[in-house]
Image (spheres, helix red, strand yellow):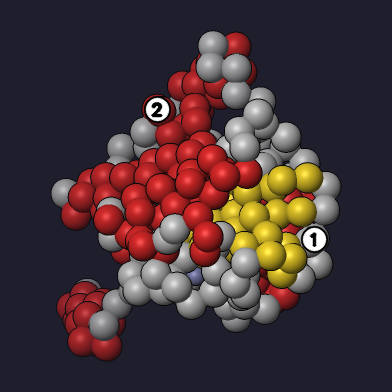
Amino acid sequence: MAERSRETLKEDICEVGRRLYSNGFIAAGEGNVSIRLSDNELMGTPAGTCKGYLTPDMISTCDMEGRTLSGPKISTEIQMHISVYRARPDVNAVVHAHPPKCTGFAVAGVALNRAVLAEVVVTLGCIPLAEYGTPSTSELAESVDRLIRTSDGVLLSNHGALTVGKEVYDAYFKMEVIEHFAEISLISRQLGGERLLPKKEVARLLDLRQKVYNLDGPPGGDACPLPAEAVAAGGDDEMVHLTRGELVQLISDAIREVGGR
Ligand SMILES: [Zn+2]
């Protein structure tokens, strides 16, 4: 693939691991990073090691079945990476982490699929939410498989996030963008809710994506990101959570209103 030597690619993975850890995107031994080397060889982070303190000798290689070829035992999540590489020939690097804010959205069952920030619409389109799958099993790989075909970033229910790129920094920076997007979304929701971009503006941004930024990867599928009109028409499947007390209060108020007539 690229002109970068294997040794340099190993150093790139170590640097991405340090950034994931120092930014609080992973804790302890969490997260994993991989690079595609050829049709049948990947390079990736080892299982059960803190990715904030990696050195090049700790980076393993494996085949497309996940069998370790060199170095320590490769990440137990490598199957998820392999299924992404199979689905996306244009992708050469995968980053998986648990950044707290976007993982909070994934735990709450809320996708980052609204047209909120112009630059995110241009770069990522939107970030859909994959169904829950047990970590380190084919179940998780399957839940990611469909969505990653049309998005460069996916939230994993009750788990974390996954991003892909042409090279490892490209995939890492998408993780940064998703976490930043989640933080802005969270703040705007606390301030009363996001004001979404209209359909016309979303179309203009997606056009810019191809013509000006020359981004040819998947923009996020047909229904993504949701413009203002779609959400106003109820096209958003966001869940509303109420405590038992709030629910009782709502029902009591409604009964009182009906009774008062
Ligand atoms: Zn994970």
User: Disc 1 residue type?
Assistant: Met
Q: CA gap, disc 2 to disc 1?
A: 37 Å
What label sits on residue 36 in the rendered view? none
Q: In x, y percent, where is residue 25?
A: 35, 59
User: Disc 2 residue type?
Assistant: Ala
Instruction: Left or right? Give the position of 42 relative to 225.
Output: right
**Which quadrant, please, contains the N terminus?**
top right
Disc 1: which residue: 64
Q: Is residue 55 above or below residue 197?
A: below
Instruction: Left or right? Give the position of 193 relative to 74.
Output: left
Q: Residues within 10 Å of mark 1 (few under 14, many from 20)?
A: some
The answer, for residue 223, to whether it is visible in the render is no
Please tell me which residue lies in front, 165 or 201. 165
Disc 2: which residue: 118
Q: In x, y percent, where is residue 129?
A: 54, 59
Q: In x, y percent, where is residue 70?
A: 69, 65
Task: Tell me what residue is drawn at x 31 percent, y 45 percent.
Answer: 180
The answer, for residue 130, to whether it is visible in the render is yes
**Which quadrant, please, contains the C terminus?**
bottom left
Instruction: Left or right? Give the position of 3 relative to 106.
Output: right
Q: Is mark 2 within 8 Å of ligand 1?
A: no
Task: Tell me what residue is drawn at x 62 percent, y 37 percent.
Answer: 5
Task: Tell me what residue is drawn at x 28 percent, y 60 percent.
Answer: 24
Task: Tell me what residue is drawn at x 78 percent, y 61 percent.
Answer: 63
Q: Residues within 10 Å of mark 2 (few under 14, many from 20)?
A: some
Q: Of the residues under marks 2 and 1, which one precedes in the sequence? A: 1
